[in-house]
Image (tube, rainbow, N blue to C red):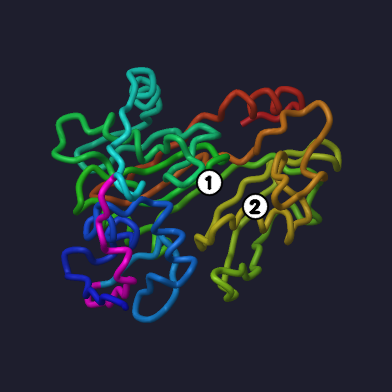
Amino acid sequence: MLINHTVPADYENTRLDRYLKKLYPHLIQSRIQKALRKGLIKVDQKRVEADHRVSSGAVISIDKFLTIDESPEKSKAVKAPKEVSDKKAKFLLDSILYQNEDIIIINKPIGIAVQGGSKVQMSLDDMLPALQFNATEAPKLVHRLDKDTSGVLVLARTHQAAVRLSAMFKKDQVDKTYLAVCVGKPKRNKGVIDMPIEVMGQKKDAKTLFNVLDHYGNDLSLIEFKPVTGRKHQIRIHASRALNTPILGDGKYGGESAFVDGLNIKLHLHARNIKLMDKTLIDITAPIFPHMKETFRILGFTL
């Protein structure tokens, strides 16, 4: 049996998973994602992903059993908030690149999942209460980076800011620049990659600008990427399949060819810069992390 719920205007452009947690606080992230994969939760009768942005008036259909808050003895669905250690809190404070009354921007290191899941002990989302300061609520995620991608990550400090910023990311109104060390050298030094990417079984338009900044013979290249659209793993897919230059350390899309003897095996993809207009122009650049610094040193790359 399905229960239908109509999204009110106050939650226009809110992420589906966040909205579901407001409706049913007992639902944990992994359970929501599993239900979405199985089609037990739909929006306007269509399958969507957890990061889908809901619209005012949209109808969310959810299987009745998911709405039942079982006792802790019968279900693992109810979990207490994870405690943020002093060490993790200091780590987050040290990662801040910019903040005002609406926004916090951090430099996310490699290896930290932005959101929770069944195999994630503690995500960045779990640690955000450490950045609440004097606000009435903890900061909210308005976009995401892959676990193994480092760099600029924008957080909203209020619900209103989250709605506003989320809309900007959804409408591709944010200028994002990534740096990647890639295996091989593209045939062209710059250009536009226009290659669709499959999302939920459907081909979606995906476009990325690229510019080769430096190269180590024909073996490795330092490439600047600017995604025009925002598909999952877009840069990684375009680098490997369109340019035939997989990102160093990206075994998922590059296989064994993504690894080079003598160089760090971690993913070499960094969200270097972000520009957005929110009351005023915000232009933030994030320093690269040690594994990329060492590879730059070995290859003679400079910024």
For the image shown, how many numbered marks are present on the structure? 2
Query: Where in the figure is residue 185, as x and y percent of width and height?
Result: 80, 47
Q: Between residues 81 and 188, which one lies in front from this camera angle?
A: 81
Q: Residue at x 61, y 69 (%)?
A: 198
For badge 2, the amino acid type reads Arg
Give the position of the N terminus as an image quadrant. bottom left
Badge number at residue 30: none
For badge 1, the amino acid type reads Asp
To which quarter of the image does residue 128 belong?
Answer: top left
Badge number at residue 236: 2
Extreme-bottom residue of the structure? 45
Q: Local crowd at mark 1 within 10 Å, few (<14), some, or many (≥20)?
A: some
Q: Residue at x 57, y 39 (%)?
A: 148
Query: Where in the figure is residue 75, as x and y percent of width and height?
Result: 34, 50
First-in-chain label (2 vs 1) = 1
Query: Where in the figure is residue 27, as x and y percent of width and height?
Result: 31, 54
SS for dot 2? helix
Badge number at residue 146: 1
Against 6, residue 284 (above or below) is: above
Q: Tell whether position 60 is magenta.
A: yes
Mark 2 and mark 1 in contact? Answer it, CB < 8 Å.
Answer: yes
Give the position of the C terminus as an image quadrant. top right
Q: Which residues are magenta?
A: 56-72
Which circle, 2 or 1, is nearer the viewer?
Answer: 1
To which quarter of the image does residue 115 belong?
Answer: top left
Q: Between residues 197 and 124, which one lies in front from this camera angle?
A: 124
Against 274, residue 93 (above or below) is: above
Query: Distance from label 2 to label 1 (Cα)?
Result: 10 Å
Q: Residue at x 30, y 45 (%)?
A: 73
Query: Where in the figure is residue 120, as x and y percent of width and height?
Result: 48, 40
Q: Residue at x 44, y 43 (%)?
A: 114
